[in-house]
Amino acid sequence: MGWILNKYLLKMLHGLRFRTKITLGVTLMLIFCGLSIGLILSAMSSKALLEEGKKRGLALASGLAFRLAEPLLAMDFLQMKNLIDNVHGQYDDVIYIFLTDINGNILSHTFSGGFPSDLLQVNPDSHTTQPLLLTTERGLVYDFNSTVVLGETNLGAVRLGLSRSDMDAQIGHQRLISLVSTLGVVSLGIVLALWFARTVTFRLNRLRESAEEIVKGNLNVQAGFSLEKNCWEIMECGKQQCPAYGDARRRCWYLAGTLCPNCQGKEYPLKIESCRDCPVFKYNFGDELQDLAEAFDVMAITVKNHIEELTEREKTIARQQGLLKTIMNVTPDFITLQDKNLTYTFAGKSFCDYFNLKEEEVVGKNDFDIFSGGQADLNFHEDKQILITGQPLAKEITFKRPEGQQWFHVVKVPVYDQDGSIMGLLLTARDITLLKKFQEQLIQSQKMEDLGRLAGGVAHEINTPLGIILGYTQLLMDDVTDEELLENLRIVEKQTKVCRKIVADLLGFSRHSHSVREAVDINASLREVIQLVEHAFYLNRIKVLFAADDTIPPLNGDRERLKQVWLNLLNNAADAISQDGVISVQSKRGVRGQVEVSVADTGMGVGEEHLHKIFDPFFTTKQVGKGTGLGLSVSFGIIKEHGGTISALSPSPAEYLPVDFPRPAHSGPGTVFIVTLPTSGGTAHVERLTSE
Amino acid sequence: MPRRLSALFLLLAAFLFVSCGEEEKPVKVSLEKREEIAFRPQLPAITYAYLPQYSHTESFQRHHRLVEYLAEETGLPLRQVFPDTFAHHISMFGQGKIDISFSNPFIYVKLANRFGARAMARIIEEDGKAEFRGQIIARRDNEAIQSIEDCRGKSWVAVDPSSAGGYLFPLGHFVDHGLYLRDFKEVVFAGGRQENVILGVYAGLHDLGSIREGSLKVVESKIDINQIKVVASSRSYPGWVYAYSPRLPQEVADTIRKALLKLDYAHDPRHRAILDAARFIGFVPSDDRDFDPVRELSKKVGLDLE
């Protein structure tokens, strides 16, 4: 039962506010101590008062006995009576006095109307403990027996009755005073306890509120109080670069790297020893609660700083993740990561897009879930081998797709974890279809090179016999008069000339012809050629627009041969248009200081399948007899000789045609030939670009 | 913790109980039950009185042993009584309330003259004498006073007008040499103190002084008594005396006298204690004739002892 009560009490106590607890505790303690001490002191003083009363009675009795010796000797009854009555009358609490001689005769007494004989029966011996307490009709009375002695001679005895009730009243009065004063002190103590509890709990509450704020996420709290004087004011140091300078929220002894000479540059737990003698510490150091509050503030600031750092790092990580993701998503390479069980843990965007999958559909799956059985089986064995052997694999694979043959360069490397064991497989695959095409073009160029050399060799060998044939034919023509024969000879001469032209072109293509280098004004050479063909084109309603960039510098080259290139390109354009169209010629400064000349037409364009062959010798789409198929290949040869490039784009991008040119009704997609020439000497940079 | 707390409580409670203390048990007594009490009359006894030179208690303390001794030695009922004054002593003697009186010689002469008191023994003082005399002193360097005759016209300081050794005996001595009170420049009394007389002379306030013999020794520690010279000494007179009332039967008086004379200061420690308390060392037998010089002196100085 008591245990339950105790538990209930404890629970109730537990639920009380701290302030109430302190007040209650101190109050109880004060009441307990106050009452205990009050009671003890009251009891002690009561006892002392009683003792004092007894002593007083004894003193009165013995004093009287002393003074009564003389009249007792002289048997002076008047004197005896006077002395006794004097004492009796002087003190109200003296109930009676009487004097007996050695034989027990009553010599004098203060009673009127007889003597209470009972008194003679009690307290006869002064040697017993004095006084004797009597209970009488007049209340409790202390009876004192004091003998009248002279030397060793006993002359008689004085008996004195002292009222105990007066003493009790005095004791009661004293007890009341002590009770009232105890209660007063206790009340004062309670008031002090209340004040004390308020002071303590005010700071504790502030600390609690700060803690709650921190729980809510607000780290910008201050549990401690502002100081009356901050460290820099006490030290008058003026060191504004000190971390403690101007920081009113944290105490300098918690801060590292403070600049006071006493601080010795130590950090918090180590520097505190030297701080104990510091005037700042002595001035500002408070009690444990203040210390706690200040430490709490420092903690809050530290946590805040750490959180800010963490946030900053998180941002950095997120940024890096984003960056990585962007790279992964943007890179055209296929990137996947598989774990030891060949389950995909990552798949790049290109990979997903290529196979028309989403990343979620890939991650967590394996090849059997994604690819056809055969392909997956092939991959599985290949991957397993890499995982077992740790040997990376690099290969090129190709397959047919509706848009054409596709080439991929696949690299599979094992991924090692920190302890050096293989934890997965990284696959990268690059679409090298384009590269493959370039390789083919390179092969084509090689072929052209060889072809040119062959053609040049043949043409050189043929040129001499052709000259002889032409010479002899013309000699014969001088000698022959027969008209029919002459006509035949003319045919031979014409065809021989055609042959010689072909040979000359072949030689030009293979750069076997002689060339003269001089400063050439590109714009001037273009104008000359345009003037030459303008009229002829006009007949076919083909308009030539020329936009010259006059800032382009003259370049070192063969004027005539460049003019031949322009003529070839213009003729080619006009052939592509045939009737009604526009040829746009532009000269401008290209990137890296080159001179770029473009010739765009509104003709029928070049099919993609032909585009990479148009510079091949003898390649032509024209009708038989309309062209030799050497014009573009000769131009290619000349430009190459100048260290430049020539390329064709079809259809022609809009930038190569003027914005407001009159586009004919039945114009084609058009083609543009772009020639770039180095301005000085030139780098032997040859590229042939094609575009869809 | 709770155990310790309860122990503290117990301790405090115990302390409280102890401090409350035990109550005394009162004895029931009635103050209302009165009865008239008569004084039981004292048994008849021979009364003994010491001339009240001192307080009763002093008288009692000096003489009660002697009284007890006499009662024991003689087998007679003996009781000390305490007259308040000299006159009371004389009147009590006259009324028969005093059977044995211990008094100075002048009172004795009065008692003998008036009521027929009879001397039975004189005491021997601590200086071993049963008589005493007065001395006339002056400063040793006072050349003007060499003899009694030189005292004429001088300033005289005496102890008290009733002092025997300090006034009456020297006065008798002066009268014998033809000097009367009128022959002195002045006669001053020193309030009954022998020391005051000596100091008065020593300080030069007075030319001569009169003291009881032996008083100089008392001031030995206070002044250089060699500065004082004794100009003259009076004749010896009998000292304090025990006398008995003529109503007391002769044989009783003799028994008492015998008991007094039996006291042996030198050899009996018990007797010595009794005599020490009384401040004398023994007795010599005496009768009325021993006091004739006193009667003569009183006539000379005009003292009425009738």
Image: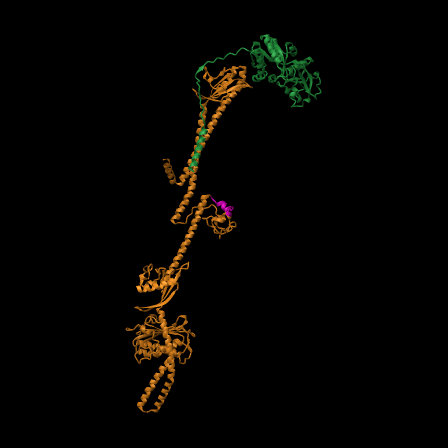
Chain colours: A orange, B green
Tell me where residue A333 sits by quadrant.
Answer: bottom left
Work out whether residue A292 or residue A389 is closer to the camera in this orientation and state it: A389
Residue A282: within the magenta?
yes
Q: Residue B302: image x %, image y %?
A: 64, 11
Question: In the displayed image of the protein, which residue is found farthest to the left?
Answer: A665
Front-most of residues A6 and A339: A339
Q: Where is residue A194 in the image (x, y as percent from the top left)?
A: 42, 38
Relative vertical location of residue A229 with respect to residue A431 in this rendering, above or below: above
**In the displayed structure, would residue A72 be above or below residue A658?**
above
Quarter of the image that includes the C terminus of chain B: top right
In this view, A69 is above or below A505: above
| Position in image of residue A668 (x %, y %) | 30, 73
Identify the main secondary structure in magenta: helix
Residue A330 can be seen in this image? no
Q: Residue at x 39, y 47 (%)?
A: A213
Q: What stretch is highlighted in magenta?
A: A273-286
Quarter where residue A486 is shown: bottom left
